Image (spheres, rainbow, N blue to C red):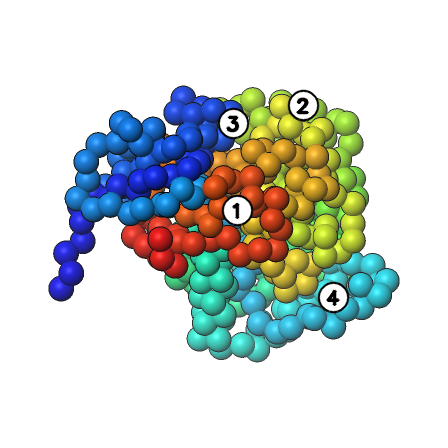
């Protein structure tokens, strides 16, 4: 049996992104010519390599970059079926709407638990290989009491960040009785699902749930101890942002179409001890040919911004946060530093986590070694695999240094 070293020194790091301005330069707390010590699954020390303490083992970063593991705070990976033809039709001019979700609902209901779990594990491995070490997973493709509960049970086997999204769209059986479906979601479905989840979410959008129904869903979940988050302002201006801020949601996700009042509300909420984070999902806007969110306006106003994948079979079938970073820099007005921060520390804020998204003492040792001298390459070389190795809780989880 191979002995596991008690401490590991990762040495000769060209650029270390700590996301701690007290340790390094700029918003990402960058340290040049750096080193990092892992002990007991956490970061024990980070700083200039000339000051690094001794450790039981040494890993040579060979002049490459180390960043925190990506924190993907929005995904829908518990599903079955395929919607590639829908994507092709959209690329040929068919507008995107929330209605395609029902196609995935039918396939997910028909799938076995083993099929759902196997696929979810595959997506987690895919994301891990691209540098994601923390992944939020939602339900929302079952829409019956039993199917939502089993979706959450599956999600809980691949992540600790589990979200109940029974209010994704109105279930097809309730097409003529949307109020009855809200009664189901806030009653028997919530009773069955709350034990499996940390979060309650609602798609507050035309074609999904109106403001009052969304408020009712969130309030019911909060009464059961679940923390709120919101899908909002994806298909047009609407009440999603306003509702999220009012309810103290951890995040409002999409934010593609914002009024000046929405930006102001998110800026004010960004100053709270527990902010409502504007989580932007550029992969969705890329795959649906919608306008991109104005990240520059949000950041300049003082809002807290995160980037997430929204990996799902309909509107954004990618798990690559590196891709999202590149799009955010190219098309959303973000600097490379801001985009990397948003995909790491921003995602942690959207999950109200302080133990991930940074590489300073006390944080989980979730880190990525890039085949690049600095983090700018994530936007500078889009589409090119750059992850050499990934550590999760201080253990090598993918690749090799």
Mark 1, mark 4: which one is toward the viewer? 4
**Snapshot quadrant of residue 101:** bottom right
Residue identified by numbered label 4: 87
Q: Earlier in the sequence, mark 2 or mark 1?
A: 1
Distance in Å between CA atoms under marks 4 and 3:
37 Å
Query: In the image, is 82 to the left or to the right of 16?
Result: right
Q: In the rendered view, would you say 396 is above or below 294?
A: below
Residue identified by numbered label 3: 27
Q: Name the image quarter holding the N terminus.
A: bottom left
For label 4, the SS is: helix
Q: In the rendered view, would you say 112 is above or below 155?
A: below
Q: In the rendered view, would you say 380 is above or below 185?
A: above
Q: Earlier in the sequence, mark 4 or mark 2?
A: 4
Query: Is residue 346 or residue 397 the one in the foreground?
Result: 397
Distance in Å between CA atoms under marks 4 and 2:
35 Å
Q: Residue at x 48, y 41 (%)?
A: 373
Q: Earlier in the sequence, mark 3 or mark 2?
A: 3
Query: In the image, is 238 to the left or to the right of 307?
Result: right
Residue identified by numbered label 1: 73
Residue identified by numbered label 2: 301
Q: Badges 1 and 4: C-beta atoms under 8 Å apart?
A: no
For label 2, the SS is: helix
């Amino acid at each position: 049996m191979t002995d596991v070293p008690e401490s590991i020194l990762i040495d000769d790091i060209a650029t270390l992104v700590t996301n701690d301005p007290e340790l390094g330069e700029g918003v990402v707390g960058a340290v040049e010519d750096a080193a990092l010590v892992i002990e007991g699954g956490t970061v024990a020390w980070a700083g200039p390599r000339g000051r690094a303490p001794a450790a039981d083992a040494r890993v040579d970063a060979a002049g490459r970059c180390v960043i925190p593991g990506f924190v993907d705070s929005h995904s829908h990976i518990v599903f079955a079926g395929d919607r590639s033809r829908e994507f092709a039709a959209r690329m040929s001019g068919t507008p995107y709407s929330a209605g395609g979700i029902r196609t995935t609902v039918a396939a997910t209901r028909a799938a076995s638990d083993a099929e759902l779990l196997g696929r979810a594990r595959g997506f987690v491995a895919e994301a891990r290989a691209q540098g994601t070490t923390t992944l939020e997973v939602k339900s929302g493709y079952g829409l019956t009491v039993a199917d939502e509960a089993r979706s959450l049970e599956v999600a809980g086997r691949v992540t600790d960040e589990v979200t109940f999204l029974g209010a994704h769209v109105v279930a097809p059986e309730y097409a003529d009785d949307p109020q009855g479906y809200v009664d189901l979601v806030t009653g028997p479905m919530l009773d069955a699902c709350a034990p499996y989840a940390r979060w309650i979410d609602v798609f507050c959008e035309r074609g999904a749930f109106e403001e009052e129904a969304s408020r009712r869903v969130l309030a019911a979940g909060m009464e059961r101890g679940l923390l709120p988050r919101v899908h909002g302002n994806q298909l047009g201006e609407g009440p999603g942002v306003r509702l999220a801020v009012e309810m103290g949601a951890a995040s409002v996700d999409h934010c593609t179409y914002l009024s000046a009042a929405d930006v102001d509300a998110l800026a004010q909420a960004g100053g709270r001890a527990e902010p409502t984070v504007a989580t932007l999902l550029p992969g969705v806007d890329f795959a649906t040919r919608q306008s991109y969110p104005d990240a520059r306006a949000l950041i300049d106003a003082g809002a807290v911004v995160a980037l997430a994948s929204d990996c799902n079979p309909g509107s954004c079938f990618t798990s690559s946060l590196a891709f999202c970073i590149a799009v955010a820099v190219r098309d959303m007005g973000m600097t490379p530093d801001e985009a990397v921060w948003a995909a790491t520390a921003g995602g942690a804020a959207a999950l109200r986590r302080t133990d991930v998204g940074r590489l300073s003492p006390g944080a989980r040792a979730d880190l990525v070694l890039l085949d690049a001298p600095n983090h700018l390459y994530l936007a500078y070389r889009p589409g090119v695999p750059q992850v050499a190795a990934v550590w999760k809780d201080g253990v090598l989880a993918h690749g090799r240094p």
